[in-house]
Amino acid sequence: MDLFEKLIADYGPLGKYSSTVHAYYTFPKLEGLFGSRIKFKGKEHIVWSINAYLGLSNHPEVHRVDEEAVANWEY
């Protein structure tokens, strides 16, 4: 079993909640540009951990590739 098959079979510790709270605990859908504050379900939240030290999180090319990947691999 490869890594992707394992992830599809079991999402990990929060996997058992994924069917009832999908997009909240697992794979949350964030709104707007990524920065020190982000919108989630219409409310603004402070982001405590940002992995954008290269400054690429809002780069248009990164967004384009991300959208293509989602379109090709969404289940």
Image (cartoon, rainbow, N blue to C red):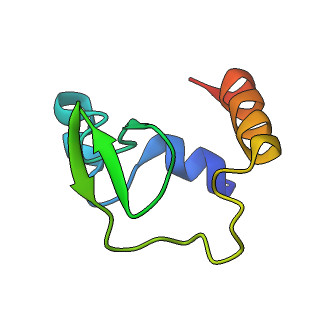
**Residue 40, placed above or below residue 74:** below
Is 63 on the left-hand or right-hand side of 39? Answer: right
Instruction: Identify the image quadrant of residue 61.
Output: top right
* 50 with respect to 40 (left or right): right
Residue toward you, 72 or 49: 49
* x then y, percent, for residue 43: 19, 38
Who's the residue at 35% across and 41% down the image?
A: 28
**Residue 48's x, y, as percent?**
31, 73
Q: Residue at x 71, y 74 (%)?
A: 54
Residue ID at (35%, 49%): 38
Looking at the image, residue 12 lies above or below residue 20:
below
- Quarter occupied by the C terminus: top right
Q: Residue at x 51, y 45 (%)?
A: 33
Q: Quadrant of residue 56?
A: bottom right
Residue 73, given in percent of the width and then of the height, sits at 68, 29
> Which x, y percent locates residue 52?
60, 70
Instruction: Indicate the quadrant where residue 42 lies.
Output: top left
Compared with 48, 32 (above or below) is: above
- Judged left or right of residue 62, residue 70 is left
Nearest the eye: 17 or 35:
35
Vertical position of residue 26 compared to residue 56: above or below: above
Say how many tags the image has: 0
